[in-house]
Image (tube, coloured by chain):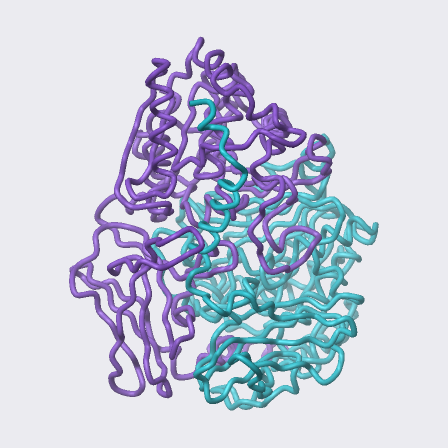
Chain colours: A cyan, B purple
Amino acid sequence: MEKKIKRLFIMAITLVFAVNCFAQQALVASSDITSPVINKDNTVTFKIYAPKAVKVEVQGDFLTPIKRKTSFGYMDGPGIAEMKEGENGIWEYTTPSPLSSELYSYSFILDGQKIPDPNNVYQVRDIASITNIFIIGDGRADNYKVQNVPHGNVAKVWYSSPTLGMEQRRMTIYTPAGYEDSNKKYPVLYLLHGAGGDENSWMELGRASQIFDNLIAQGKAQPMIVVMPNGNGIQQAAPGEAPDGMVKPQFMNSKTLEGSVEKAFPDIMKYVETHYRTINDKANRAICGLSMGGLHSLYISTLYPDKFDYVGLFSAAINRENKGENADVYENLEQKLTVQFKDAPKLYWIGIGSTDFLYEDNVQYRKLLDEKGYKYTYLETDGGHIWRNWRVYLAEFAQKTFK
Amino acid sequence: MEKKIKRLFIMAITLVFAVNCFAQQALVASSDITSPVINKDNTVTFKIYAPKAVKVEVQGDFLTPIKRKTSFGYMDGPGIAEMKEGENGIWEYTTPSPLSSELYSYSFILDGQKIPDPNNVYQVRDIASITNIFIIGDGRADNYKVQNVPHGNVAKVWYSSPTLGMEQRRMTIYTPAGYEDSNKKYPVLYLLHGAGGDENSWMELGRASQIFDNLIAQGKAQPMIVVMPNGNGIQQAAPGEAPDGMVKPQFMNSKTLEGSVEKAFPDIMKYVETHYRTINDKANRAICGLSMGGLHSLYISTLYPDKFDYVGLFSAAINRENKGENADVYENLEQKLTVQFKDAPKLYWIGIGSTDFLYEDNVQYRKLLDEKGYKYTYLETDGGHIWRNWRVYLAEFAQKTFK
């Protein structure tokens, strides 16, 4: 029997092939393709095996944007380029010029049908839409890559929110490298997602853990705990992570922009401050968010004016109507700002893209701050209401907090 | 200015639509479709919008399996059914009979090209292959669903493995509900993946956190910490989570089946037992794994015979050649078993499917155990080397540990 146990190495190799074939069986001839390929000069080549297709295109945010009519008017969306059929049914497209350092997203369009690149397992979800991603380095997107630096741990934790009437809600918590092996206390950044997002968004679309790992390793940001809660007041957790099952993700428009989330925010802080080694004072708390999360950050920081010394509004959805049972959250904003800016936050940071559909609202809000003499730091970038900007804003804001 | 801040609710609604359109713009007409739909009688309807397609099929593990030739011989793979084109370019297929309770996976085949269901964001990755999933309840797969029960937290943590010469390796750690709010110490289950897998596999393909949440809530399993390490000795982390970047996932055949992982296992235990509230004795440690992870569990438990009272071999790849620098890990197995079974594990559990390509190796191994009079618990199911079986084995094994 011992001899039988001692079989040839070929057994292991056979196992390898068998399982491999099983896992990949559906890819057939396609499975040998690598796509995308980032060439040495930072041009990028895309390939797909589609021998029966009449027309194959690549759609991506690295191509000249196309304006599309939406219910809100014309908005920039990803551009489209035709791919060319080569040998053996493999279609190919190479960008005509090198791409600058960024995280890009793309899909293929196969005879009119949008599909992911079958040879790229790296994808992100935005509401119900999934796109492939890739990263071009040698620039700012180096901070979006997993680098050979100490990594923080990332946990999905469940906390109780009595204010929202939920025993269990899910959030993502990043603890910086070294946290687990020290007794040190840390400052906390609360990082809020936008409408349509959830507690996974900043990790997946925003590359939050990579940004913090890299900035902290470079000494550009302080080691901090980063809390990414779910900002949809009717949701326990991201789609698929709650008892309502694998439902098709819908845009949340209930309990998102009517004060519930702002009022329930102390439930989150309570959990964090009783379960992590946090420094519990204003100087060691920051709050920032994108779009709806920018609105949440604005109103949470006015609602609890003694809590946050660092406030970041990224492409913030500034305006809210004051009605419903939580109208008081949004009422008397000017009065609340007077209180907040009496002992002003050390940093009140506003960032927005010049073509963002919320640009004018932010102009008006800055006008108000200017009139009152409230100091803030402002960054205007090009582009619109997109994750490319929000990653930039996070990296900027992170480098200015707790300093 | 205050009046400008107080804009109409329409602003929020507009924001909702705008972001929604932006996120979903690429789906166009397809975005209204819900697929799959689990009908009241547990038949399932699949839909896809593909007006230009000539032929659309659904490929899934709920259809009559198709034998495919692989380098290892003929193996069962997912069956295929033709979809029918209906109105407006929407293709549809409904299973002819209700599906029994299970987690199923499927893809569409559009004119010969395998694509995911564009209306189902729930996917799993197996090496470089991505498939959609759905769950039919009212049976054993109820334990694979997120139910309204207390949830354990799940963390991705980085630990140091001096034995493998890596300062940082990644693993997944499940702490049962209540862990964070008590001072109790807990038993630990080490749960190992197969060849081609990584520290994410048991969570994603294996539904580990759901299985434990549900079994613990039902009182069927003890609350336990579940540790899911990475069993590829040359890997720091799952594809995309390590500094080698977003590379196309490859089958690992280096440092997987040659003793490295078994020898480095104490590095994992050391981290867990110094960073979590664990009960550090044999009676409170369990180890189990699938395929390659079954081999690892077998040899780790013989290498450290005083450590594990619960050992589970799921479709285990039993045989190894004894050569290379870690040959001693696999040498003298019978002798090592004699030592291990002198103070026999409380549970030595073996599970395998009747059509598994490793079936005969397991027959031989059980013969050896029988000859020596070593007691074990055996479960034979139908089916082959597939996750359906491994989820069943995990639920069975979990209910028998620490009791």
Q: Is residue B60 visible?
A: yes
Please name whichever residue, A272 or A111, is drawn nearer the observer in this view of the structure: A111
Please name whichever residue, B174 or A365, is drawn nearer the observer in this view of the structure: B174
The percent position of residue A190, horizontal first and vertical second, equals: 63, 53
Q: From this view, report whether residue B246 is shown above or below residue A148.
A: below
The percent position of residue B198, horizontal first and vertical second, equals: 54, 45
Q: Is residue B147 visible?
A: no
Q: From this view, report whether residue A360 is shown above or below residue A340.
A: below
Q: Residue visible at 41% across and 72% down?
A: B118
Please name whichever residue, B14 or B340, is drawn nearer the observer in this view of the structure: B340
Q: Residue visible at 31% across and 73% down?
A: B57
Choose top left, top right, bottom left or bottom right for residue A331: bottom right
Quarter holding the N terminus of chain A is top left
Choose top left, top right, bottom left or bottom right for residue A122: bottom right
Is residue B202 shown left or right of residue A181?
A: left
Is residue A284 shown left or right of residue A129?
A: right
Most distant residue in the top direction: B342
Please name whichever residue, B144 or B390, is drawn nearer the observer in this view of the structure: B390
Q: From this view, report whether residue B307 is shown above or below residue B242.
A: above
Q: From this view, report whether residue A301 is shown above or below residue A116.
A: above
Q: Residue visible at 45% across and 56% down?
A: A21
Q: How many marks?
A: 0
The percent position of residue A310, horizontal first and vertical second, equals: 73, 56
The percent position of residue B387, horizontal first and vertical second, equals: 38, 47
